[in-house]
Image: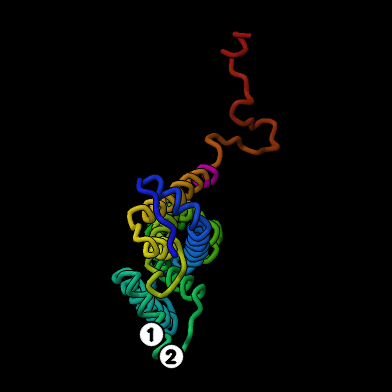
Amino acid sequence: MKTSLPADFWGRIVFIIQRYGLSYLKGAGTTLVISLVATLIGCIIGFGVGVVQYIPIEKGDRLYKKILLRIAKAVMNIYVEVFRGTPMMVQAMFIYYGASQVLNLRMSMWFAAFFIVSINTGAYMAETVRGGIISIDIGQTEGALAVGMTPVKAMNHVLIPQALRNIMPQIGNNLIINIKDTCVLSVIGTVELFFASKSVAGTYYTYFESMTIAMALYLTMTVAASRLLRLWEKHMDGPANYDLATTDTLAYTSGMLTTPDRQRSR
């Protein structure tokens, strides 16, 4: 037997939180876990795809290298276009139910959620990484090669660290998008925040109140993620000024040598 609902809006909000607050928190926790893990995996996929797409095919390369690179780039371009050009909800249903019907593969809720969001994020991150690497001045690559670095070392130690800093805002943006877009996983039975909210709404037909609570939780998670990522960006920037490290007593760092004006003022 259902308990009677309060007549006023805020009374119904309090009533729902008291009875189903734990369900909302569990759903929000599931949303956060899926978003964080899938964004991390998606970034790794994106870096791999973006780096391969950036590798140039030179005239002096061996034939087998040219063939392998062309095949790899073609496959990755198809992957990026397909997953950027179709909605994640359709991808979720296609992969989850298609794997069951065609491959007789029963995916668990967690595996399906991580897999679907990760490959979707990876497709977007691939273009972001490629653009981030292209944005690095060509002189950085030429300088690295000039000091004896191999192309692989130049990529790992010079280009990728700088590209990572440049694309940090987009990584944060993808995390925020994933926090919101995990709601599409409800179509395959993933019990995340939207699924929990919809279940509560259907119990008492309080769609407005239930979705108000869900919106507040989504907003809290996205704002918190945005603030934390901005702090991380500032940390990666490092201090505004740097002193040169030297053991040469004749080569003083900035600020250590007293100017004539300062000597007179003393």
Q: Extreme left residue here?
A: 85
Q: Residue flagged by tag 2: what amino acid is it?
A: Leu
Q: Amino acid at mark 1?
A: Gly
Q: Height in image: 24 above or below 10? A: below
**Real-space Cα separation, disc 2 to disc 1, in angstroms:** 7 Å
Mark drawn on residue 103: 2
Q: Which span of residues is magenta-colored?
A: 232-237
Total labels drawn:
2
**Which numbered disc flags the more N-terminal residue, 2 or 1?**
1
Percent across and percent down for residue 116 are: 43, 72
Left/right of residue 215 with respect to residue 162 in the rendered view: left
The magenta stretch spans residue 157: no
Residue at the extreme top: 265
Counting from the top left corner in percent of width and height, residue 183 is at 39, 64
**Quadrant in the rendering for residue 150:** bottom right
The image quadrant that residue 126 belongs to is bottom left
- Looking at the image, can residue 87 be seen? yes
State whether the magenta stretch is mostly helix, strand or loop.
helix
Residue at 49% across, 56% down: 19
Q: On screen, 219 above or below 198? A: above
Is 44 situated left or right of 56 in this image? right
- Quadrant, the N terminus: bottom left
> Which residue has dot 1 on it?
98
> Foreground: 4 or 222?
4
Residue 228: x %, y % from top left: 51, 46
Q: Residue at 41% across / 56% down in the picture?
A: 4
Q: Nearer the viewer, residue 126 or 223?
A: 223
Number of residues whose C-alpha sits closer than 10 Å to that of mark 2, classed few (under 14), some (14–19) or many (20 or more): few
Looking at the rendered structure, the secondary structure element under dot 2 is: loop
> Given contact means CB atoms under 8 Å apart, are the residues at marks 2 and 1 in contact?
yes
Q: For mark 1, does the 10 Å Cα neighbourhood hold few (<14), some (14 to 19), or many (20 or more) residues? A: some
